[in-house]
Image: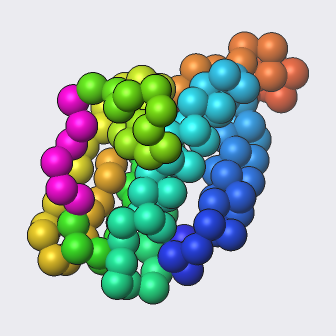
Amino acid sequence: MALPRDAIGIPMVRRVLGDTLRCIGVTEDCVSDVLLATSEACANAIRHGGPAKRYAVQAAIGEGHCELRVVDNGLGLGAIPRQYPSGDAEHGRGILIMQSVVDEISFDITPGSGTTVRLRKQLDWDQDWLTRHNRHLASV
């Protein structure tokens, strides 16, 4: 999805991605983790992706994983924080939050040309849902 660099797109990304994951039987806790990480990555693209007017979210689901890429064409991310900021800081926790809820996170940073955040999460399956819908993990 290509989105305007505005917070209004984040709920749309959350809705499409969340509905898709729930539709294939992913547990609600796992869906919540993916949506939290994606929201944080989108918020960073909106905040730091200038001067570009758009950013993109790409998602792929397969082999038991969900992989997301949030791509902006901004000036490029500076340093990756190594620890949480002080308790009174208003910003700076997004990357650390993403790291805490996904299995893998990586950054492709090109100064002056943008940042791609790659998030990867092993999906947890709701066995009751799979049984009710007669689905098999091999098909996902």
Is residue 20 a member of the stretch shown in magenta? no
Give the image location of residue 117, x and y in percent.
32, 53
Residue under the image location 30 percent in, 77 percent down: 73
- Is 61 placed left or right of 49 in the picture? right
Give the image location of residue 59, x and y in percent.
48, 55
Which residue occupies the foreground of this view, 3 or 1? Answer: 3
Give the image location of residue 50, x and y in percent.
36, 78
Residue under the image location 66 percent in, 22 percent down: 29
Residue under the image location 47 percent in, 33 percent down: 88
Predominant secondary structure in magenta?
A: loop
Give the image location of residue 56, x and y in percent.
45, 70
Is residue 78 a member of the stretch shown in magenta? yes
- Is 8 placed left or right of 71 in the picture? right
- Image quarter of residue 138: top right
View extreme (left): residue:
111
Q: Which residues are magenta?
A: 77-82
Which residue occupies the foreground of this view, 129 or 16? Answer: 16
Q: Quadrant of the C terminus?
A: top right
Compared to residue 34, the image places residue 4 above or below, namely: below
Compared to residue 96, the image places residue 54 above or below, namely: below
View extreme (right): residue:
132
- Image quarter of residue 35: top right
Compared to residue 29, the image places residue 119 above or below, namely: below
Residue under the image location 80 percent in, 22 percent down: 129
Q: Quick check: can you spot residue 60? A: no
Q: How many marks?
A: 0
